[in-house]
Image: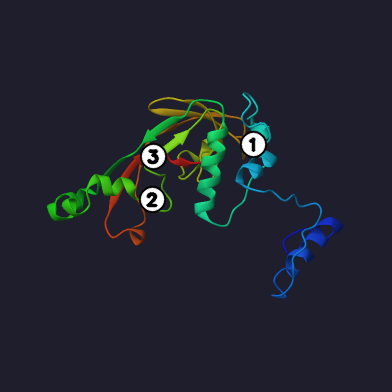
Amino acid sequence: MRLNHANLENANFAKFLMEIGTNPQEIVKLPSTIHKCQDLKDIISVVYPQLDVAMTSTATFLTERTILSARNDDVSAINTAALNIFPSNTHTYLAADKMSEDDEIDRAIINRYPNEYLNSLDPPGIPAFKVELKVGCPIMLLRNIAPKDGLCNGTRLMVSRCNTRIIEAQILNGEKCGNLVFIPRISLTPSSSEMPFRMTRRQFPGHL
């Protein structure tokens, strides 16, 4: 519906989308332009060909293609499968979780929610406790770190170096596209409406 209907190909595709689901008994016939993949590995190999070859992943290569999914669980599965194909070494970063200072005073709350439980949580809007990255893989920022430098929530980057305390990356979109930047660990707090208690996670503010 949002496509430019001045283009005949776009108009036909929009019409195809609108017709899907109007008849519960119908058999949907995909247009010949839509490639049908057998499994997740097939999808990744079609969208990101030769991802397992060194130097294939470049800024242009990553910005010209993407895989969309409606469910977060599927997104995580796709990201994990794609990351495993990258030829470089995996760098694992574990977060530091703790209760908020106010809750730390109440020992009953601390005993009820030990660190192992905090580590297992995956609240929306903050990175996972365990983040795995490889040189050449894309990441997306989850916070406004330095808007003037192009580091905003939603900025896409390509990892160029993984260090212990900092990640070097290249910006892939926006006015600062192409610039090299450094991403530090920062302390993040989930929305109070998402958690029955307050916690802080110190981690690199990005995800695949």
Q: How many marks?
A: 3
Q: Nearer the viewer, residue 41 or 133?
A: 41
Check disc 2 and report its element: helix, strand or loop.
loop
Q: Nearer the viewer, residue 138 or 74?
A: 74
Q: Amino acid at mark 1?
A: Leu
Tag in front: 3 or 1 = 3
Q: Which residue is mark 2?
A: 122
Q: Which residue is mark 1?
A: 62
Residue 118 vs 57, above or below: the answer is below
Q: Residue furthest right?
A: 8
Q: Amino acid at mark 2?
A: Asp
Mark on residue 138?
A: none
Q: Which residue is mark 3?
A: 130
Residue at left 72%, top 68%? 20
Q: Amino acid at mark 3?
A: Lys
If you read the primary sequence from the N terminus, does the residue marked by circle 2 or circle 3 appear first?
2
Cα gap from disc 3 to disc 1, whole angstroms: 23 Å
Looking at the picture, how far across and down is residue 30, in whole percent?
Answer: 77, 59
Residue at left 51%, top 39%? 151
| Quadrant of the rendered image containing residue 41 | top right
Looking at the picture, how far across and down is residue 67, in whole percent?
Answer: 63, 47
Check disc 1 and report its element: helix, strand or loop.
helix
If you read the primary sequence from the N terminus, does the residue marked by circle 3 or circle 1 appear first?
1
